[in-house]
Amino acid sequence: MRKRYEEIDIMRGLAIIAMIAIHTAAWYPRDPQVYALWDTLEFAVPIFIFCSAYLFFKQEYHRHITHTLGYFKIRLLRMLVPYYGFLLIYVPLVAYYEPKKVTQAFIVDNIFLAGGLDFNWMVLLFLLLSFLMPVLLYLLTSRRKVFYFHIALALGSSILFLFWRPYEHYRMLMILPWSLLIVFSWMVAKYQDNLEVMTKLFGASIGAFVAARAVLMLQRAPLDHFSNKYPPNLYHLAFGFVSIIGLFFLSHILKNSHGYVRQVISFFSKHSYTIYFIHITVIYIITVVQKATFKSHTFVSFFTEVLVATALIQLLFIGAQRLRKSRATQD
């Protein structure tokens, strides 16, 4: 049986709740407090990447080629099956309420993750990282010079993107800078019990964040994370590094807690991937299908409605799965 890492479960649960808050806060850009919250919670994607990479390194899928192939198979099924199931629901909704959006190019781009819906870039990113992680681990253990060369390229790209922001081509370029998070996750997984190393890592992350922010300020460039993560530059990545270490230690405190809050976090963590797609659908229904009603929402009421509706739909989905299994067992 695989070992459970409760601190990772907590971090993933907090990340998906933060993701829901980000996507609801984005509808209130003129509210300065909501805008500040939206920008602060942009640690969500780095946390998701960290959780996946951390578990990969801890569970040692790399020990043998059969483990690696099994890992690829599991990742492909876990990521693509829910995604295509989501498309079967979401695309007809868009076709009915916004028919001009659904073109042949729109459908093809969504199928192959080349574009279409803005949200599917994360599915593509995690697929690419799933294939990259075993490669990086192989280079780390057997081809150190190539591994260091990759780090230099990844770091160089994150610095380059402080000055050049190729937003239109970010899907083709994002894998290189995001791969720095894989290396960072490996370091945390290896040295998490070494307080001296972790302190230095935290200090270096803060230093990189401050330096990158200074570069952006000198250029009078936007300092919000949305403007700096497509593809991610050093400013956004360093923010992710700092957030990861902070939440990693916070999760060690929270994992010993009990009660309703801990159960809610665990629920969202366990079902984070399907919840990701469910909450996107819920947001679309509220903002487009129920557009007139949505105008009366505040951020708090909108976030609460999306969070609760998403959780209820997930619970219904779990109940349907259990009922199907129960009937299959009886047959």
Image (cartoon, grey):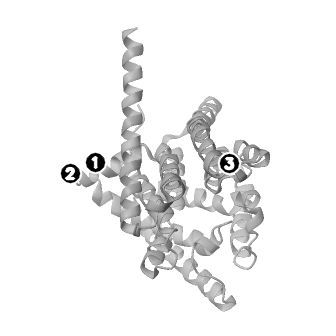
For image coordinates 53% across by 73% down, the residue present is 205
Q: Is 86 placed left or right of 131 in the picture? A: left
Circles 2, 1 touching at the beta carbon (< 8 Å): yes
* Badge number at residue 259: 2
Residue 167 point in image, percent of width and height = 73, 68
Locate residue 239 relative to residue 114 in the image: left or right: left
**Distance (Cα) linking label 2 and label 3:** 37 Å
Residue at image position (64%, 84%) is 216
Q: Where is residue 314 in the image (x, y as percent from the top left)?
A: 40, 41
Q: In this view, does 146 lie to the left or right of 213?
A: right
Above or below residue 164? Residue 143 is above
Instruction: Please state which of residues 42 and 195 is positioned toward the viewer in this rendering.
Output: 42
Q: Position of residue 264 (x, y in %)?
A: 31, 50
Query: Which part of the image, by quadrant, shows the N terminus?
Result: top left
Q: Find the residue positioned furthest to the left.
A: 259
C-alpha span from label 3 to label 1? 32 Å
Of callouts 2 and 3, the N-terminal one: 3
**First in residue order: circle 3 vs circle 1:** 3
Q: What residue type is labelled 1?
A: Gln
Instruction: Estimate how packed mark 2 is, as few (under 14), some (14 to 19) or many (20 or more) residues with alpha carbons within 10 Å.
Output: few
- How far separated are the C-alphas under marks 2 and 1? 6 Å
Quadrant of image for the C terminus? top left
Q: Determine which residue is flagged by label 3.
A: 128
Q: Residue 101 bears which disc, if any?
A: none
Closest to the camera, between mark 2 and mark 3, is: 2
Identified by mark 2, the residue type is Gly
Residue depicted at 58% across the width and 68% down the height: 237
Tag 3: Cα neighbours inside 10 Å, few (<14), some, or many (≥20)?
some
**What secondary structure is marked by label 2?**
loop
Can you see residue 229? yes
Per the image, the residue denoted by label 1 is 263
